[in-house]
């Protein structure tokens, strides 16, 4: 289900343990207040790691479930990486599930949909749909009041994870102030900033297939504190624009192609020329490199600058 639908979810009040599948940390954090409002009475939900939850004595869990709180608030626990719990703790939770009118609720959080194929399927399941770029753009429009074009541009630049997006939006709002709306140039200047290079230098180097300059600009962005995934998102954005431009350039003029790919009109001719510098096989292989880079940056700790150097050589060099 979508997170907005989850807010209308009506859990069985007789159930005390739930499985919650969500791969965005920002939404997991926001779910605490939603869970607190889903049950009758006054509830407060706290976060806890799987290890911290394992350290709680089984009898303590049962006592909390059976005993009303002195502070007129019942307790809920969101257990991060809940699919990592031991078999013994799952047995404890199965006993907790049977307690009538429990004063304790437990939500087992996981970002892995396959977790429900194992022991988690014994508990009521709430699975939040993976966020698509269109969903995230809509979230930006609703939460921050930006236009559709600006929302799409920000998603292209930063990616679909909500925590980095919310941080960048706070910076943008502070930078712009209350007197005017956020514009594309603000995103380029603030999010994709570099003291040594302009906001379009990375794009221009990729269009011109200037591998050495690409590496220099990407390195400068990393040195100045831009997150590696944000740099990768920028490279992926240009690569998608090249892919779109190459496809439409056969039937449309430069300005039309630029408009379709969200390129400034004054860069239309340069953009179309850049599209002709790449063949379809190169573009396809480039997408594979981008997917591998996204996986490596999220799941391991490579030497980031060296990784970008090799990746850009494969794509642009």
Image (tube, helix red, strand yellow):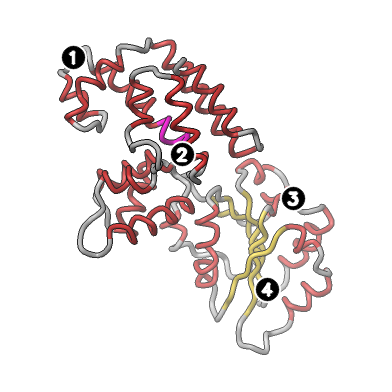
Q: Earlier in the sequence, mark 3 or mark 1?
A: 3
Residue found 24% across the figure and 31% down from its top: 263
The residue beneath circle 4 is 104
In the image, residue 198 lies at what x, y percent?
33, 37
CA–CA distance in space, label 1 to label 4: 63 Å
The residue beneath circle 2 is 221
Residue depth check, mark 1 versus mark 2: number of the one nearer the observer: 2
Q: What is the chief secondary structure element of the magenta stretch?
A: helix
- The kind of secondary structure element at disc 4 is strand
- The kind of secondary structure element at disc 1 is loop
Residue range highlighted in magenta? 230-236
- The kind of secondary structure element at disc 3 is helix
Callouts 4 and 3 close, C-beta under 8 Å: no
Callouts 2 and 4 close, C-beta under 8 Å: no
Q: Earlier in the sequence, mark 1 or mark 4?
A: 4
The residue beneath circle 1 is 251
CA–CA distance in space, label 3 to label 1: 54 Å
User: Residue 84: which disc?
Assistant: 3
Mark 3 burial class by Cα count in 10 Å: few <14, some 14-19, many 20+: some
**Whether residue 117 is situated above or below residue 39 in the rendered picture:** above
As for residue 207 lying within the magenta part, the answer is: no
In the image, residue 257 lies at what x, y percent?
21, 23
Residue found 63% across the figure and 55% down from its top: 109
Residue depth check, mark 1 versus mark 4: number of the one nearer the observer: 1
Residue depth check, mark 3 versus mark 1: number of the one nearer the observer: 1
**Whether residue 229 is situated above or below residue 122 in the rendered picture:** above
Q: Earlier in the sequence, mark 1 or mark 2?
A: 2
Q: Earlier in the sequence, mark 2 or mark 4?
A: 4
Residue found 47% across the figure and 15% down from its top: 317
Callouts 1 and 2 close, C-beta under 8 Å: no
């Amino acid at each position: 289900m979508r997170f907005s639908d989850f807010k209308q979810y009506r859990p069985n009040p007789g159930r005390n343990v739930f499985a919650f599948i969500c791969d965005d940390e920002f939404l997991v954090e926001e779910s605490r207040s939603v869970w607190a409002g889903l049950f009758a009475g006054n509830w407060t939900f706290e976060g806890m790691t799987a290890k911290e939850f394992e350290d709680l004595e089984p009898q303590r869990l049962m006592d909390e479930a059976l005993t009303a709180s002195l502070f007129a608030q019942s307790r809920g626990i969101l257990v991060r990486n809940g699919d990592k719990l031991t078999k013994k703790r799952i047995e404890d939770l199965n006993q907790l599930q049977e307690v009538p009118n429990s004063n304790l609720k437990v939500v087992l959080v996981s970002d892995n949909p396959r977790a429900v194929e194992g022991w988690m399927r014994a508990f009521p399941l709430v699975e939040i749909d993976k966020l698509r770029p269109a969903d995230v753009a809509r979230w930006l429009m609703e939460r921050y009041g930006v236009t559709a074009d600006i929302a799409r541009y920000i998603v292209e630049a930063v990616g679909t994870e909500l925590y980095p997006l919310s941080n960048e939006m706070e910076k943008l709002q502070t930078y712009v102030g209350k007197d005017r709306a956020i514009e594309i140039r603000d995103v380029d200047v603030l999010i994709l900033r570099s003291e040594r290079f302009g906001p379009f230098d990375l794009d221009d180097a990729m269009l011109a297939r200037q591998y050495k300059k690409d590496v220099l600009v990407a390195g400068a962005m990393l040195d100045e504190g831009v997150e590696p995934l944000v740099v990768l998102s920028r490279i992926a954005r240009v690569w998608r624009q090249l892919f779109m431009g190459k496809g439409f350039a056969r039937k449309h003029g430069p300005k039309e192609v630029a408009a379709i790919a969200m390129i400034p009109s004054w860069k239309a001719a340069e953009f179309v020329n850049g599209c002709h510098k790449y063949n379809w096989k190169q573009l396809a292989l480039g997408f594979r490199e981008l997917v591998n880079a996204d996986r490596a940056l999220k799941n391991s700790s490579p030497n980031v600058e060296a990784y970008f150097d090799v990746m850009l050589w494969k794509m642009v060099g």
